[in-house]
Amino acid sequence: MSLEELVSKYMASTEYVLKKMEIIENPMNMDAESIGKVVNYVKAYLEDAKYYRDRKKFEVSLASVAYCEGLLDALKLLGAVKFEWPMKRKGRKKEK
C-alpha cells in the first residue's frame, strides 16, 4: 500500500468515526464542552491532513491524521465518547 493510499484509508476511518461517535456521560466528569473542544482539534487536524495530502506531502498528512486517531482513542479510553473504528487493522490489539 502506498503512503497516499494509507493516508486516504486513515482519513476515511477518521471521518467515519466523527459521523458515528456519541459523546457520553463518563466517570471522569468531563463536560460536553470540554469534549467538544478536543473533537474540534480532531477536525482541525483532519483538515490539515487533507491540506497536506492535496499538496502531495503525504508524510505530514499521515502525521496529522494519526494525531486525529490518537485524540479520538484517548477520548474513548477516558470514557468520553463511544465509537468503533470501521475495520480492524492487522496487528491492532483487541479491546477488553
Image (cartoon, grey):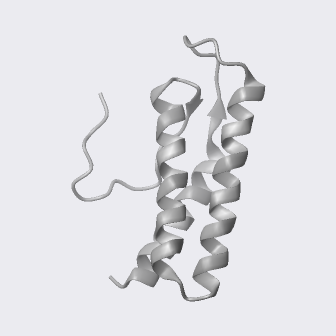
Q: Position of residue 89 (x, y in %)?
A: 31, 58
Q: Horizontally, is 13 left or right of 23 in the view?
A: left
Q: In this figure, what is the number of numbered marks?
A: 0
Q: Is residue 9 above or below residue 16?
A: below
Judged from this view, the residue extending furthest toward the bottom is 56
Residue at the location (52% across, 23% down)? 79
Q: Horizontally, is 21 left or right of 32 in the view?
A: left
Judged from this view, the residue extending furthest toward the right is 33
Quadrant of the frame with the C terminus: top left
Residue at the location (62% across, 88% down)? 55
Q: Position of residue 85 (x, y in %)?
A: 46, 49
The quarter holding residue 90 reads bottom left
Q: Position of residue 33 (x, y in %)?
A: 78, 27
The quarter holding residue 49 reads bottom right
Q: Is residue 94 above or below residue 86?
A: above
Camera-side residue of 41 and 17: 41
Residue at the location (40% across, 56% down)? 87
Quadrant of the frame with the N terminus: bottom left
Residue at the location (40% across, 81% down)? 3
Q: Horizontally, is 40 left or right of 12 in the view?
A: right
Q: Is residue 69 above or below residue 36?
A: below
Camera-side residue of 43 and 91: 43
Q: Position of residue 42 (x, y in %)?
A: 64, 50
